[in-house]
Image (spheres, rainbow, N blue to C red):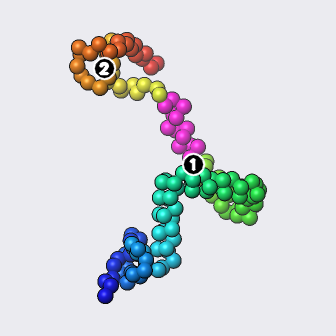
Amino acid sequence: MNQKIRCANRKCRRLFLPDPRVKNHRYCDREGCQRVRRNRWQRQKMKDDPRYRKDQQESQQCWTEQNRDYWQRYRDQHPAYTERNRLLQKDRDQRRRSDNLAKMDALNPKSHVKAGSYYLIPGTADLAKMDALSHKYLLIPIG
């Protein structure tokens, strides 16, 4: 006689009796659990099967070409969505400006790197390496 097992869906975890005809039966029959099972299967398939991934991309492109005005119609029919998105984008833009993203590679003024000559040695700290690269770095102070 079969024993009950726990559903693999983390949000469910209820006990159920697996169908002996289904190999590796791990999810109960609830709609949400089956959706989780299908989504996990598709993510894994997209990761492992290049042909499946290509077919999915082509299918999505075909749908997009046939429904070019989808998002425009959606925004027209859902003004609350449009307004919420506008407010969230405004917030993202403000955070981006305050983070100074335009200066991503600027040197931090509290850097502990001192001006001077340095050797770049690949893979090891052995200073006798013949392929060590010598570079001189000059730090330019801000202000």
Q: Which residue is mark 1?
A: 91
**Which residues fall within the magenta stretch?**
91-104
Residue closer to the observer: 73 or 59: 59
Depth check: give the residue in front, 35 or 105. Answer: 35
Q: Which mark is residue 121?
A: 2
Quadrant assignment for the N terminus: bottom left
Q: CA distance from mark 1 to mark 2?
A: 44 Å
Specify the label residue 114 is tagged with. none
Badge nearest the viewer, 1 or 2 = 2
Category of crowding for the residue at label 1, using alpha-carbon neighbours closer than 10 angstroms: few (below 14), some (14–19), many (at least 20): few
Residue 31 image offset from top left, x and y in percent = 51, 77
Is most of the magenta stretch helix, strand or loop? helix
Quick one: label 2, few (<14), some, or many (20+) residues within 10 Å?
A: some
Query: Residue 7: where, in percent of width, then height?
Result: 38, 75
From the viewer's perspective, is residue 80 above or below residue 102? below
Please state the horizontal and vertical placement of residue 50, each as a whole percent of the image: 54, 51
In the rendered image, residue 95 lying in the magenta stretch gets the answer yes
Q: Residue at x 62, y 55 (%)?
A: 55
Q: Amino acid at mark 1?
A: Asp
- Considering only vertical position in the picture, is 138 above or below 30? above
Residue sitting at x 26%, y 24%:
124
Name the residue nearer the viewer: 58 or 80.
58
Which of marks 2 and 1 precedes in the sequence?
A: 1
